[in-house]
Image (cartoon, rainbow, N blue to C red):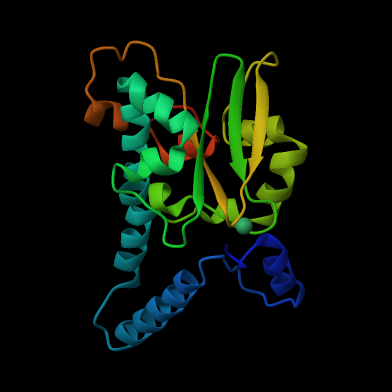
Amino acid sequence: MSTHNHHHHDHDHDYGHGHDHDHDNRYSDMQARVKALETVLTEKGLIDPMAIDAIVDTYETKIGPRNGARVVAKAWSDPDFAAWLRTDATAAIASLGYTGRQGEHMRAVFNTPDTHNLVVCTLCSCYPWAVLGLPPVWYKAPAYRSRAVIDPRGVLAEFGLILPETKKIRVWDSTAELRYLVIPERPEGTEGLGEEALADLVSRDAMIGTAIAGPRP
Ligand code: FE
């Protein structure tokens, strides 16, 4: 049983340190170390900060979320895996080699023709990093965290996702112990595609719920 829960975490936030910190404290440490190292190396003229930004972007938008995209592609391709994902997402995801560092549980929420799912962490920035990599800056921003709950349809519109009024939106609030992966609807016309090609259709944002699956623009 982890004592590292939201309640405890919330207290940390009340003392007004200006930085955006995460439950994965080792991760924040790591970020600080990377930043310090980057500064030293840049001052010595050994690296180009633009190159570092490009590497971070790669982890944030490509390498990390590729794990989740493989989970989604397998769920689309293999009904038994999809059923397992519904009943025990932690185990189903771990079977592909993607596991959390602190034993947090995963839940997969499936989009349907009637319901769209959206993930947020209202208190801080809990994120299913084992399947999605680094959280985007907007996910940690107070505006997203508060407005995703109050006005999810409006927030989605700002992401360019206009859903029909008839479609329900369910918002899932992550915690340190339970994190969510959205399984988007499989796009039409993809019947012949293999799992790797299907995974190409699944963006990070589609697995947070701020986009749907489909060819990248
Ligand atoms: Fe959180």
Q: Is residue 153 visible?
A: yes
Position of residue 208 measured from the top left corner of the image (x, y, whole percent): 52, 40
Q: Nearer the viewer, residue 102 or 214?
A: 102
- Horizontal arrangement in the rendering, residue 196 relative to residue 43 (left or right): left
- Horizontal arrangement in the rendering, residue 71 relative to residue 178 (left or right): left
Q: Is residue 183 visible?
A: no
Q: Which residue is pictured at 33% across the width and 67% down the height?
A: 52
- Horizontal arrangement in the rendering, residue 161 relative to residue 200 (left or right): right
Q: Nearer the viewer, residue 12 or 8?
A: 8
Total tally of numbered discs in the picture: 0
User: Can you say whether 68 is above or below 125 in the image?
Assistant: above
Q: Which residue is pictured at 54% across the width and 18% down the height?
A: 112
Position of residue 169 measured from the top left corner of the image (x, y, whole percent): 66, 27
Instruction: Indicate the quadrant of ligand 1 in the picture.
Output: bottom right
Residue 50 image-quadrant placement: bottom left
Position of residue 193 measured from the top left corner of the image (x, y, whole percent): 24, 19
Q: Which residue is pictured at 34% across the width and 87% down the height?
A: 40
